[in-house]
Amino acid sequence: MPQGRPSVIPDDGLTTRQRRNRPLVIVHTGVGKGKSTAAFGLALRAWNQGWPIGVFQFVKSAKWRVGEERALRVLGDSGEGGSVAWHKMGEGWSWVQRDLESSEEAAREGWAQVKRDLAAESYGLYVLDEFAYPLHWGWVDTGEVVSVLRDRPGAQHVVITGRNVPQALVDTADLVTDMSKIKHPMDVGQKGQRGIEW
């Protein structure tokens, strides 16, 4: 893309501006670190543009104190950029939790809330953090998600994170990044640490 120009200009009847401002479905997947971090980086850009932001955490435990949440809440309350709403789907899910039935119900309720917000055009950017897991496990129907995202009204951008994103969602998305792993401290027995993982 030399000098910011796309290598292909489709014959779709849209002006350059219409094509540039088309809302995107973005997917961050793969086994490497940084999927959520990249999505929250997009949220910072959206905040700077004055867009309202809706964050929906589908898997991470509601008890975790996450740095991105604190930072985005402070920014959202600052009165300078866009507003920020943070939704934790039930109690969340962690790798040691065993109550998968309530986690499945919470994921379905979370998706129902996302659908309501999309219909109401509540946010300019939706961060569906770790939403790939409920899709991969069959808790939320991938076909329905693809249909809802394809038919969403207005100029709402959606970013979905998590491993094992279903192929149907990859095919529908406008931008897909696969975060690969070369090496990770956990490979040699080091657990996550403050400021790096949360």
Image: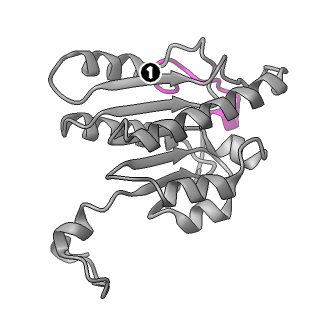
- Residue 175 shows in this picture: yes
- Residue lying at the far bottom in this picture: please name it: 11
Asked if the stretch drawn in magenta spans residue 187, the answer is yes
**Vertical placement of residue 160 versus 107, above or below:** below
What is the quadrant of the N terminus in the image?
A: bottom left
How far across and how far down the image is residue 85, in percent? 39, 24
Q: Nearer the viewer, residue 20 or 68?
A: 20
Q: Main secondary structure of the magenta part?
A: loop
How far across and how far down the image is residue 143, in percent? 67, 58
- Residue 179 shows in this picture: no
Please identify the quarter of the rendering in which residue 45 is found.
top left
Q: Is residue 154 left or right of residue 17?
A: right
Q: Is residue 153 left or right of residue 61?
A: left
Which residue is identified by label 1? 195
Q: Residues within 10 Å of mark 1 (few under 14, many from 20)?
A: few
Q: Residue at x 30, y 88 (%)?
A: 11
Q: Residue at x 35, y 33 (%)?
A: 53
Secondary element at tag 1: loop
The colour mode here is: one colour
How far across and how far down the image is residue 198, in percent? 50, 22
Asked if the stretch drawn in magenta spans residue 193, the answer is yes
Q: Nearer the viewer, residue 52 or 113?
A: 113
Q: Is residue 167 left or right of residue 74?
A: right
Q: Residue at x 46, y 36 (%)?
A: 117
How far across and how far down the image is residue 155, in percent? 32, 52
Please identify the quarter of the rendering in which residue 107 is found.
top right
- Residue lying at the far front in this picture: please name it: 120
Range of magenta residues: 186-198
Q: Nearer the viewer, residue 187 or 116?
A: 116
Query: Amino acid under label 1?
Result: Gly
Q: Residue at x 69, y 42 (%)?
A: 133
**Vertical placement of residue 64 versus 159, above or below:** above
